[in-house]
Structure formats: structure tokens, C-alpha cells
Image: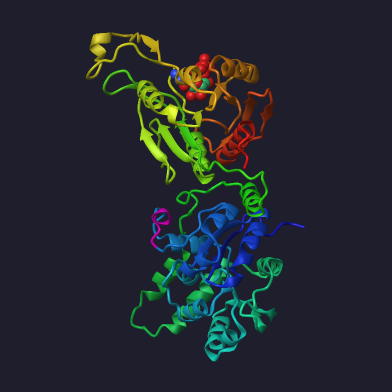
């Protein structure tokens, strides 16, 4: 049977209720079934579930703040998100959010998105609260208003409530919520969007008493038919592996000794290309985007390390809570890393350092008239940073190199590892399509000082980073 959830964008709204703990499981199931999930929390929901868990499970940034700068970069983000959705579910929905929805009060991200949801997108609301609150006339009135507005109410179940009372008000289990979502998606008629818009137009027109405004109908029709630009370009998709993160989290919580932690560790990571100036307007560089090094820095920080990121010029933003030193040339990177590395436990050279730099730098701009038909540029070798650290590191420091190879990858990787005295080498092939430079994915083989060689399939760079740290922790005996 076809998977109806596949590629469906589902907004999961969570409000402040004890039953919120059930929702990470729902998000996990939705993602497993290939839905695209955006989680939105009310400020009070944060008391019951954490943004980090939900971001990892949903593989998307979690929205909470109405004026979050990251969300703002797409313009009227709440409208875009609402218009891209195939379905929105609010579970658990507190009495307070029910009342806001019924009156159209938009005082946080969740109520704003729900109100901005186009009428042809199903909105499911699962009230969950103590039975007296649920049975109160105000709550019942609000539920009836929402029902008459076309909102699908998932009724609460009877049973033991967090107050200790027994009665109606329990949020149904995640599998029931999932079933309901699937059921609605299967039955909902999305196909006849135009007819629907026309229906909306009809309804709106009959409800608008402003007969004098002759252009109203036309303007409304145009507004309804206008395409809303996709959010895909503006919201960066986070490709965290929910499975891996979740497993690690579970291991940590259950006291399992195999969970990964870099707490107390200092990690230095180099990233990006270097730029070698020819004159004041021209330079030599390479195609490195810095994504691998930045992913390593983010993962190291998330695992609890203190991180220094030494980065060549890139177009990406450094992760929060990471110390960043920006450099330009190979020489600058060399000097920065050499003066810092002795303070670090783990050093990872993922930067694509230029091997050569112009032997002489020309001030100003080299003029064509002065060079004639040909410009012969003399290049000299740069300092090999990795090799230099390899020579000077102590036994307690762990050094990781990267090797970009286009042939005899593994063999050359082992040679480089030995020559540069590394503890581990990450080999990436220059030949795998959509992998390596510029891509969000990478195809790596990890060569370890204990002789093990582990090849991975193409994976998002953050997952590659997790695997790299997993290997480092195994070799340093620091699994704790
Ligand atoms: N590296 C470095 N300093 C340099 C050049 C490279 O520290 N001047 C590091 C890179 O950061 C990487 C490793 O050396 O961790 C291997 O880089 P790579 O370009 O694959 O190999 P090279 O040693 O430069 O040799 P070749 O280009 O001949 O393959």
C-alpha cells in the first residue's frame, strides 16, 4: 500500500500540557514514514519537551519564537509555512490554546500559524487537560466553535489524569494520533483546489457586506490564486539523523556506558579553503565550502566539547557557542593553528589548505600590458600544517587528517596517515557524485591507527561527523 505520509509536510504544534511527552514519539513515526515535519512549540510547551530532541527527531529546526531571526529570513515565514503544509495537528492542545484558536488570537508562533493555515488544509486539534477543564462550558463552547469552523477535533480519552483524578481529558497515544493523521490525509480532498478557492470566494463574498467595493471580488480571487513561494530555499533543512541522536540520548538517560560525550574535551577543527593572493585583486583557491568542518564543529559542540573552529573564507554561519577564528591564507591558518593546537585534546584538519602559494605577491594589480600574452606564475609550497602538528603533538593528543584522493584512495590515505603521523585519517573520494566539496553529503572511509578501515555509504555531513567522533572516542577509550 502506498505510503500516504511520504513527502507530506506536517506541522506538529505542541502546547504546554504534561501529555506533550508523547509527541516526540509521534514526530519520530512521522519522520520514519518519510513525512516532512515542522514542529512548533508554544513558550509553555518548552517546560515539557525540549527543542533539541524535537529538532533532532523532526530533522528540522523547531519554531518557538515568533520573531526568531532564523525563521525570519524567508520573509513572512508563518504564512509560507502554513501555505506549504498538507496538514497541521495541535497535540496536546491546552484549554488556553483552544480558546485562542476559537477567537483567532495570534499571540505566539503556534496560534499564528494555525490561523494562517489556508482553509483547504486540514487542522487537527487534540485537546488534553484535566476533566473539569475539558468539561467547562468555556472549553466546550470553544470546541464547538472550532468544529463549526471545520477543525477536526480528536476527542480526549478517559483514564487516569496527571492530577490523579480519573476522567476524560487524556491525550490519545501516538499511534492513535498517527492513525488519525493518515485517515484524514486519505480522505481529504486536495485535488480540487480551484473549486475550493472558488467556494471560499463565494463564501467570502456572501459574507462581505461591502457591496460598494466593486473590485473586491476580483482582488480576492487574485489573492487566493497567487502562488506562495516555496520555503524550501529559505529554510535550511537540517539533516540530523534522528535515529542516531535519539539512540544516544536514550543511552545517556538509561545510564548506558556507550553513549557519546566529549564533555571536558577541547577540540580544534580547521575548515574551508584558503585564499592565496596573486595580486591585490586575484587569488588562487579551491572549491571547499567548509560544510564538513562546520558540521564537525557543530557535532563536537553538541557532544559537549569546547570547540575552536579555524576557518578559511566560507559562506556559511558558524554554529553557536563555538569559538571562531577566521583566516584567509595558508600561512595565516598555519600560524593560528600552530600557536593554539597544544591546548587541544583533539585536532581535526578538515580544511582544504592550498598546497601552493605565489612565490611573490604583487602589490596593486598586475597589468596585461606588463605581462604580454602569457603570465607565468611561480608558486612555492605552503607549510604542511597537519604534518607539523604530527611532528610536535604529545601522546595524549589525537590528530585527525583528511585526505582527498582521486585514485588509489585507501592506499594513498594510509600513506598520508603514516607520513603525517596522524591517529586517524578520513579519506574522501574526489570521484563520488554529489559528495565532498560543496555538497551536503560525503562518502568517507575512516582509517584508524589500530589498523581498522571503515567505509561508509554516502551520508549527510553531520552524520559523517558523528561517525568520525564515534571512532575517535573508541580509539581514545573515552566512551563514558
Ligand atoms: N594539509 C595541511 N596543510 C597543507 C596541506 C594539507 O594541513 N598545506 C592537510 C589537510 O588539511 C588534510 C591533509 O593535510 O587534512 C591532506 O590534504 P590533501 O590535500 O588530501 O593532501 P596533501 O597532503 O596536500 O597531498 P596531495 O595534495 O599531494 O594529495
**In the rendered view, would you say 185 is above or below 422?**
below
- How many labels sit on residues? 0
Q: Is residue 88 visible to the viewer in this orientation of the structure?
A: yes
Residue most extreme to the right: 1
Which quarter of the rendered picture does the C terminus lie within?
top right
Does the magenta stretch mainly form a helix, a strand or a loop?
helix
Residue furthest bottom in the image: 137
Q: Nearer the viewer, residue 293 or 460?
A: 293
> Compared with residue 45, is residue 56 higher up or lower down, i.e. above or below?
above
- Against 472, residue 246 (above or below) is below
Locate residue 86: give its quadrant: bottom right
Q: Position of residue 340 (x, y in %)?
A: 40, 28
| Residue 379 falls inside the magenta stretch | no
Q: Which residues are magenta?
A: 67-72
Residue at point 56% right, 85% down? 133
- Residue 68 sits inside the magenta stretch: yes
| Residue 259, percent from left and from top | 64, 45
In screen coordinates, is 279 left or right of 106?
A: left
Residue beneath the point at 38% across and 10% down: 380
Which is nearer the eye, 363 or 195? 363
Residue for point 64% across, 66% down: 22
Residue 96 at what x, y percent from top left? 49, 79
Which residue is painted at 64% across and 28% down in the image? 445
Amino acid at each position: 500500500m502506498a505510503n500516504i505520509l511520504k513527502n507530506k509536510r506536517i506541522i506538529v504544534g505542541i502546547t504546554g500540557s504534561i501529555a506533550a511527552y508523547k509527541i516526540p514519539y509521534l514526530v519520530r513515526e512521522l519522520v520514519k514514514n518519510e513525512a516532512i515535519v515542522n514542529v512548533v512549540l508554544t513558550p509553555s510547551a518548552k517546560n515539557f519537551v525540549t527543542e533539541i530532541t524535537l529538532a533532532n527527531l523532526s530533522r528540522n529546526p523547531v519554531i518557538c519564537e515568533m520573531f526568531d531571526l532564523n525563521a525570519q529570513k524567508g520573509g513572512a515565514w508563518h504564512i509560507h509555512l502554513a501555505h506549504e503544509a498538507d496538514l497541521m495537528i495541535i497535540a496536546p492542545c491546552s484549554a488556553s490554546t483552544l480558546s485562542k484558536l476559537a477567537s483567532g488570537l495570534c499571540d505566539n508562533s503556534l496560534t499564528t500559524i494555525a490561523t494562517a493555515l489556508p482553509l483547504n488544509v486540514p487542522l487537527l486539534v487534540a485537546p488534553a487537560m484535566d476533566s473539569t477543564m475539558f468539561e467547562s462550558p468555556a472549553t466546550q463552547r470553544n470546541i464547538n466553535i472550532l468544529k463549526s469552523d471545520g477543525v477536526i477535533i480528536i476527542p480526549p480519552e478517559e483514564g487516569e489524569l496527571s492530577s490523579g483524578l480519573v476522567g476524560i481529558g487524556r491525550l490519545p497515544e501516538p499511534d492513535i494520533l498517527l492513525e488519525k493523521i493518515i485517515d484524514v490525509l486519505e480522505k481529504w480532498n486536495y485535488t480540487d483546489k480551484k473549486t475550493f478557492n472558488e467556494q471560499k470566494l463565494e463564501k467570502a463574498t456572501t459574507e462581505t457586506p461591502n457591496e460598494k467595493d466593486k473590485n473586491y471580488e476580483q482582488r480576492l480571487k487574485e489573492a487566493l490564486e497567487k502562488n506562495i513561494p516555496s520555503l524550501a530555499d529559505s529554510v535550511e533543512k537540517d539533516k540530523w539523523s534522528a535515529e542516531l541522536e535519539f539512540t544516544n540520548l536514550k543511552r545517556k538517560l538509561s545510564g548506558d556506558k556507550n553513549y557519546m560525550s566529549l564533555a571536558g574535551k577541547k577540540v580544534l577543527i580547521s575548515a574551508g579553503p584558503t585564499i592565496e593572493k596573486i595580486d591585490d585583486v586575484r587569488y588562487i583557491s579551491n572549491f571547499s565550502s567548509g560544510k564538513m568542518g562546520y558540521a564537525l564543529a557543530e557535532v563536537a559542540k553538541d557532544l559537549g566539547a569546547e570547540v575552536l573552529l579555524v576557518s578559511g573564507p566560507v559562506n556559511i554561519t558558524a554554529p553557536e557557542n563555538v569559538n571562531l577564528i577566521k583566516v584567509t591564507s595558508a600561512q595565516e591558518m598555519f600560524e593560528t593553528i600552530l600557536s593554539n593546537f597544544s591546548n587541544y585534546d583533539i585536532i581535526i584538519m578538515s580544511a582544504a589548505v592550498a598546497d601552493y602559494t605565489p612565490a611573490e605577491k604583487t602589490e596593486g594589480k598586475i597589468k596585461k600590458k606588463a605581462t604580454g600574452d602569457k603570465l607565468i606564475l611561480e608558486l612555492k609550497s605552503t607549510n604542511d600544517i597537519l604534518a607539523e602538528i604530527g611532528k610536535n603533538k604529545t601522546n595524549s593528543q589525537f590528530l585527525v587528517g583528511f585526505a582527498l584522493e582521486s585514485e588509489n584512495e585507501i592506499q594513498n590515505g594510509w600513506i598520508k596517515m603514516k607520513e603525517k603521523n596522524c591517529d586517524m585519517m578520513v579519506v574522501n573520494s574526489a570521484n563520488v557524485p554529489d559528495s565532498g566539496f560543496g555538497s551536503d553529503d560525503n562518502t568517507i572511509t575512516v582509517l584508524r591507527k589500530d589498523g581498522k578501515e571503515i567505509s561508509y555509504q554516502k551520508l549527510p555531513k553531520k552524520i559523517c561527523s558523528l561517525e568520525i567522533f564515534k571512532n575517535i572516542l573508541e580509539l581514545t577509550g573515552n566512551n563514558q
